[in-house]
Image (cartoon, rainbow, N blue to C red):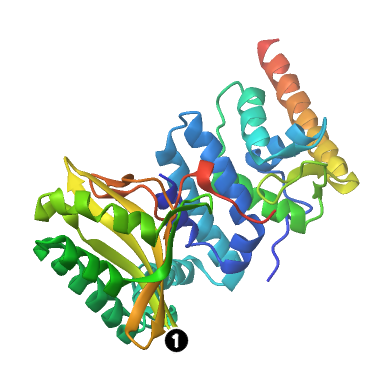
Amino acid sequence: MLRVFDLLSMLYPAEYRARFGDEMRAVFVELDRRGWWLLLEYGGLVRGALRERRRHMGVLAGGAAFASVVNLLLYWYLLPIGVAHGQTVKQDPSALEVARSIYSRSFTALREAKTIEEMRKLSDEMDAPEWISVDRFGRTVLTKKDVDRDLESLLKLPPERRAAGMDIIWAEKDAERLIVVAWMMPTESHGVTRGTLIRDIFVSGANGWRRVRHDKITPNDMVLSVDGKAQVLPPMDEDHRVRPR
Amino acid sequence: MRHVVEEQEPLSEPVFLILTSLADGPRHGYGLIRDIETLSGGRVRLSTGTLYGALHRLLDSRWIERFQTDDTSRDKQSYRLTGTGRSRLEADLERLRALARAASARLRVREA
């Protein structure tokens, strides 16, 4: 419902939106909460937008309708294309490639490992001796020694369960460091997609990139989407929104 | 181009109801919608688009003004009547009273 409201509010002149947009949205949320018949609201928004356009541009209704069509075209078609293809911070393809290469090699080796020595070698190639795992409260919960002690139990798992994959959201690097933000082990079943948001930090050294820190930012297997509808991506619902007053 | 409410025009029903609603104290957007619904016996339910279009014109005409309270936030502004707005509402009330008197007089003549 709010998405429709947001789209329709784009029909209003920018000056008007800056002046009344937040208030109108808050009123709409309140009406929605109380079960108001929102079709009337949508109609009122379109009529109001046409009036404000006419007033704003000082032209007749035909001009206002034309302006609305132009606005629709801009906000619904051209702007999203512009944002997707040029006006956002771009992913550095080389950083993404380095990240994909590191994890791909690691996941494959993890599945193929047959001995504890192979597991130790893999661990040493992936993680620096000072590697730590940090929980979402900023507490160090694992060190490399802890992980190395646990390699035997990891080896006992069926290969397909040792590494389920990841979706990289963002990778960035400079000469010394590489950071990777990703959904770890994204899984989908019965229309529900789950995953864990993580950030890994790698440091470049004589032996290539070694991971020094693994942050688990959200609880395990957080619900990311239900029936294709995102649960954690913007626009969030009102309970999750924070805006400057 | 600024648009203001014409001084000489009779008030439109939404404007009349908004000014009436603010006559006894400040209200924010949602409060106005609910109060106007009550005032009109459930007949008038202003949409958000209509309400804020009218508030826009009334602010520009200086018949109402934003009213700062301790809990005023960007998404919950209150509005109150100015002296000009009160005078304009009273003038329109007088116009309506005069019309009502004229209508009543003609009805009495017809009945007599």
For residue B111, what is the image quadrant? Answer: top right
Residue A141 position, x and y percent, is 45, 51
Residue A228 position, x and y percent, is 24, 49
Residue appearing at x 82%, y 54% in the figure: B62
Residue appearing at x 71%, y 43% in the figure: B11
Residue appearing at x 17%, y 60% in the figure: A116
Q: Nearer the viewer, residue A107 or A220?
A: A107
In the image, taking residue B67 as reference, residue B47 lies left or right, namely left
- The mark tally for this picture is 1
Q: Residues within 10 Å of mark 1 (few under 14, many from 20)?
A: few
Q: Nearer the viewer, residue A20 or A220?
A: A220
Indicate the amino acid at tag 1: Asp
Q: Nearer the viewer, residue B94 or A94?
A: A94
Query: Looking at the image, is A78 positioned above or below residue B80?
Result: below
* Residue with the most extreme top position: B112
In the image, taking residue B67 as reference, residue B110 lies left or right, namely left
Residue A131 position, x and y percent, is 42, 66
State the SS at label 1: loop
* Residue with the most extreme right position: B83
Residue A208 position, x and y percent, is 32, 85
Query: Looking at the image, is A38 positioned above or below residue A244?
Result: above
Residue named by callout 1: A174
Q: Name the image quarter holding the N terminus of chain A.
A: top left
For residue A221, what is the image quadrant? Answer: top left
In the image, taking residue A52 as reference, residue A148 lies left or right, namely left
Residue appearing at x 61%, y 44% in the figure: B51
Question: Residue under mark 1: which chain is it in?
Answer: A
Query: Looking at the image, is A238 positioned above or below residue A119?
Result: above
